[in-house]
Amino acid sequence: MHDNGWIWPMGFMMVGGLILAVIIVAAVWLAVANSRRPADRNDSARRVLAERYARGELDVEEYHRRLDGLR
């Protein structure tokens, strides 16, 4: 009558482990994604600033002042 009674607890443990693994993977992915964003924005702003300086839109003093503001 109860020859397969161990299957249900084992199934619940596997589902719980799977849910825990999904939560851990999502947390790591969010942490990595959020840690990259500020650096990308600063690099983009520095690149635009360097392009404006190269085109002659900014003088040396203005370039350095704005570059210091990005740090």
Image: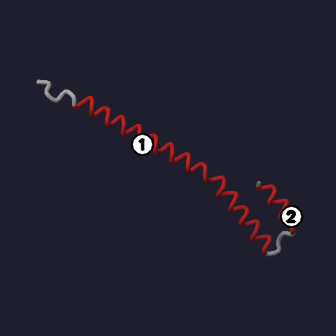
Q: Which residue is mark 1?
A: 22
Farthest-out residue, bottom? 55
| Snapshot quadrant of residue 50 | bottom right
Kindly state the secondary structure of the residue where label 1 is placed.
helix
Farthest-out residue, right? 61
Location of the C terminus (image quadrant): bottom right
Residue at the location (56% across, 46% down)? Answer: 31
Residue at the location (73% across, 66% down)? Answer: 48
Circle 2/circle 1 CB separation < 8 Å: no
x and y, in percent, of residue 28 in the image: 51, 45
In the rendered view, does 26 fall on the left or right side of 66? left
Q: Which mark is residue 62?
A: 2
Kindly state the secondary structure of the residue where label 2 is placed.
helix
Q: Which mark is residue 57?
A: none
**Can you say whether 54 is above or below 3 in the image?**
below
Amino acid at dot 2? Glu
Classify mark 1: residues with Cα within 10 Å, few (<14), some (14-19) or many (20+): few
In the rendered view, does 42 fall on the left or right side of 14? right
* Colour scheme of the picture: secondary structure
Amino acid at dot 1? Val
Residue at the location (27% across, 29% down)? Answer: 9
x and y, in percent, of residue 33 in the image: 56, 51
**Can you say whether 50 is above or below 37 in the image?**
below
Alpha carbons under labels 2 and 1: distance apart? 49 Å
x and y, in percent, of residue 54 in the image: 78, 74
x and y, in percent, of residue 27 in the image: 50, 42
